[in-house]
């Protein structure tokens, strides 16, 4: 009944809602609706009746005889933004005109300009790397030590220990080891070093008293030639200037070494503490589809580099310990100094152990030729034991690097960064070899 009544009275739902809500009815929404001036009086009255609040939006007229609320005020229409001309809003997009013709990338001018920019950029990078060589070296050493100590930190972290505490324990343990070595080694080294400098003339006289050396000197007059050369150098005034300059340079080297050592310790501590965050930030740069494999390969490379570093230090320490025992048994002087030297030289891959044995043999030869023979025999036997028994057990978890690759890597690293480069070359070669076997070779097989 209400529906027929609304249709008969010409009830306009939109007009009623507009009158009640304060909105002005739109004529454009109903183009077929006749004008109010042409409607009958009854239709005009019905079209202006507002809907009750409970019936708004349902298209039913208010109940007859009910009180009607007064019509609300008509809301003004929102002003439209100007489409052209006039002042623009703050966030409006400005029209700067059509874009120009794009560059012709095949143009000789374009190619030459881009090439010149590339050359200048490469030159600037090379110059910056050259100036930052010391800083880069310290960063490389710190990162290498971080990879070497990280397995110990991870082992403690797996025992439900927070990484911060694990890093603190490992770092304090390293400092304690260095302090213990210094307390045990430095006093004998200083004492025996001064004794070596004091007894150098006596050792030289003992060498000259050797029958074999006397026979060689009698034939070639070596002693006379050496004395003449030394006298000439002493008479030259530039010798003393060079000596004092060498003393100053030695002081600078010591100060620089202390500062560099402290810097490496601080950087290593920082890298150990922030290594997981650094790795996560680096892994986030890899596409998600390749991220799992990249993470696995990176973790394996870092594990093998760290294991190699720890293994190399262990092998060098074993070499130094047994060398010290051997030199103490045969009564060779300066055993502590020579053992420390053998340990440090043992860190150099391929040739470090041979260099240490050579130095010890020379010192033993100056003391007594028989001792030198014992030293040579000992190091020959020890090298065989180390190569076939010690090294395989310690390095069994690291990647096996072929001998040719080891030699080439050590030579290349030594040419680039000296002894430091030779130390770092083998683990990085191991990582590169792993990437070659796991990435390049499978890709070539698929093609």
Image (cartoon, rainbow, N blue to C red):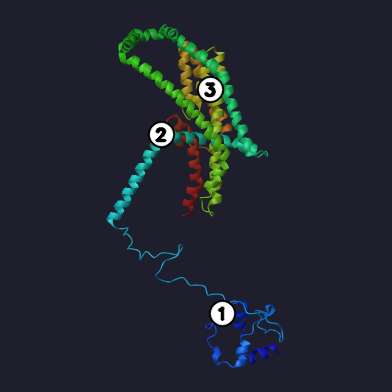
Task: Name the quarter where the N terminus is drawn.
Answer: bottom right
Q: Between 391 and 87, which is closer to the camera in this rendering?
A: 87
- Where residue 417 appears, as percent x and y from the top left, is 42, 32
Say the numbered circle drawn on residue 316: none
Is the residue marked by circle 1 packed among few (<14), some (14-19), or many (20+) residues within 10 Å?
some
Q: Is residue 190 left or right of residue 207?
A: right
Q: CA distance from mark 1 to mark 2?
A: 84 Å
Is the residue marked by circle 3 packed among few (<14), some (14-19), or many (20+) residues within 10 Å?
few
- Where residue 354 appears, as percent x and y from the top left, is 47, 24
- Secondary structure state at the residue bearing disc 1: loop
Query: Residue at image x 72%, y 86%?
Result: 65
Q: Between 347 and 446, which is closer to the camera in this rendering?
A: 347
- Secondary structure state at the residue bearing disc 2: helix
Query: Residue at image x 55%, y 85%?
Result: 30
Q: CA distance from mark 3 to mark 1?
A: 108 Å
Q: Considering only vertical position in the picture, is 428 above or below 390?
A: below
Q: Is residue 159 left or right of residue 90?
A: right
Q: Considering only vertical position in the picture, is 142 above or below 252?
A: below
Give the quadrant of residue 237. top left
Say the numbered circle drawn on residue 416: 2
Q: Is residue 364 visible?
A: yes
Q: Between 258 and 29, which is closer to the camera in this rendering?
A: 29
Say the numbered circle drawn on residue 24: 1
Query: Residue at image x 54%, y 20%?
Result: 323
Q: Is residue 396 visible?
A: no
- Where residue 108 appears, as percent x and y from the top left, is 27, 55
Report which residue position mark 3 lands on. Answer: 381
Mark found first going from the N terminus, 2 or 3: 3
Mark found first going from the N terminus, 1 or 2: 1
Q: Between 301 and 105, which is closer to the camera in this rendering?
A: 105
């Amino acid at each position: 009944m209400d529906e027929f009544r609304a249709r008969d009275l010409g009830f306009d739902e939109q007009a009623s809602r507009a009158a009640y809500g304060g909105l002005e009815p739109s004529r454009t929404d109903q183009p077929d609706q006749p004008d109010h001036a042409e409607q009958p009086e009854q239709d005009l009255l019905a079209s202006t009746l507002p809907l009750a609040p409970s019936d708004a939006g349902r298209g039913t007229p208010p109940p007859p005889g009910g009180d009607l609320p007064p019509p609300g005020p008509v809301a003004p229409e929102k002003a439209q933004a100007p489409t052209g001309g006039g002042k623009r809003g703050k966030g409006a997009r400005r029209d700067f005109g059509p874009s120009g013709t794009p560059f012709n990338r095949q143009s000789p001018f374009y190619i030459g300009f881009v090439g010149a920019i590339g050359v200048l950029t490469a030159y600037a990078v090379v110059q910056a790397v050259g100036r930052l060589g010391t800083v880069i070296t310290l960063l490389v050493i710190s990162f290498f030590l971080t990879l070497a100590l990280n397995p110990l930190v991870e082992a403690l972290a797996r025992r439900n220990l927070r990484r911060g505490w694990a890093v603190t324990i490992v770092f304090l343990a390293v400092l304690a080891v260095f302090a213990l070595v210094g307390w045990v080694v430095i006093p004998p080294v200083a004492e025996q070093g001064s004794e070596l400098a004091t007894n150098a003339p006596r050792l030289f006289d003992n060498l000259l008293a050797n029958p074999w050396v006397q026979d060689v000197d009698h034939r070639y007059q070596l002693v006379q030639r050496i004395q003449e050369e030394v006298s000439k150098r002493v008479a030259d005034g530039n010798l003393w200037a060079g000596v004092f300059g060498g003393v100053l340079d030695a002081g600078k080297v010591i100060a620089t070494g202390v500062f560099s050592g402290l810097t490496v310790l601080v950087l290593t501590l920082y890298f150990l503490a922030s290594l997981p965050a650094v790795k996560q930030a680096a892994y986030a740069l890899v596409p998600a589809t390749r991220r799992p494999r990249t993470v696995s390969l990176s973790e394996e490379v870092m594990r093998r580099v760290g294991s190699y570093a720890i293994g190399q230090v262990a092998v060098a320490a074993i070499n130094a310990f047994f060398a010290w025992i051997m030199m103490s048994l045969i009564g060779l002087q300066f055993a502590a100094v020579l053992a420390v030297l053998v340990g440090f030289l043992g860190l150099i891959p391929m040739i470090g152990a041979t260099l240490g044995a050579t130095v010890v043999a020379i010192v033993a030869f100056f003391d007594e030729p028989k001792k030198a023979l014992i030293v040579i025999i000992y190091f020959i036997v020890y090298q065989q034991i180390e190569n076939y028994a010690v090294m395989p057990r310690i390095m069994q978890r690291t990647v096996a690097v072929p001998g040719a690759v080891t030699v080439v890597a050590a030579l290349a690293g030594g040419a680039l960064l000296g002894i430091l480069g030779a130390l770092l070359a083998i683990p990085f070669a191991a990582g590169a070899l792993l990437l070659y076997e796991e990435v390049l070779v499978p890709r070539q097989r698929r093609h």
